[in-house]
Image: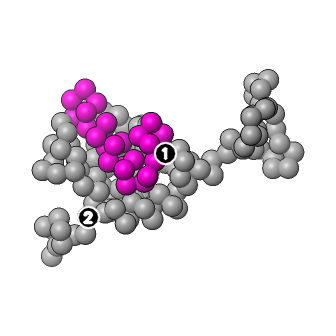
Amino acid sequence: MSRRERTDPASPGTRRRAGGDGSPLGRAERSRLAVRLTPRASRDAIEGFAPEPDGTEALRVRVTAPPIEGRANAALLRLLARALGVPPSSMRVAAGARGRRKLVDVKGIDGAEARRQLARASTPPEDRGDAG
């Protein structure tokens, strides 16, 4: 812990910055999303959460950008930021920058609220053309 931070005795483990507004540096307004990205799609779309082969659940997203020089990742962050109502600068690809499966960190929104907003922004299956 740096000199500018101290532990808040009211909430063990939560760090506060000395000075400023004293807001906690906890994880209440942060979330991490597991994403399965499909680049070079016919359109940009958030398809919703779906199970992965390993038993986890990931948000399926399609972007038209190619996976060259980070363009698909940038398009992913712009699309998610728009859906979540946060600036793209508050997001980053934390893992999987060069693969289809990614972990995206988002500041300014908690996990439950992020899931609700992404579910609302998802394209219904009948609009995707894969309804059965």
**Residue 22 visible in the current orientation:** yes
Q: Is residue 41 toward the left or the right of residue 89 in the image?
A: left
**Residue 53 visible in the current orientation:** no
Spot the residue most to the front: 20
- Residue wearing tag 2: 123
Q: Secondary structure at mark 1?
A: strand
Give the x, y percent position of residue 57: 39, 59
Crowding at label 1, few (<14), some or many (≥20) Cα neighbours within 10 Å? many
The relative height of residue 123 versus residue 89 in the rendered view (above or below) is: below
Q: Amino acid at mark 2?
A: Thr
The magenta stretch spans which residues? 67-90
Q: Quadrant of residue 77?
A: top left
Q: Amino acid at mark 1?
A: Val
Give the x, y percent position of residue 26: 67, 45
Task: Indicate whether residue 23 is drawn in magenta.
Answer: no
Q: Quadrant of residue 1?
A: top right
Q: Secondary structure at mark 2?
A: loop
- Residue wearing tag 1: 106
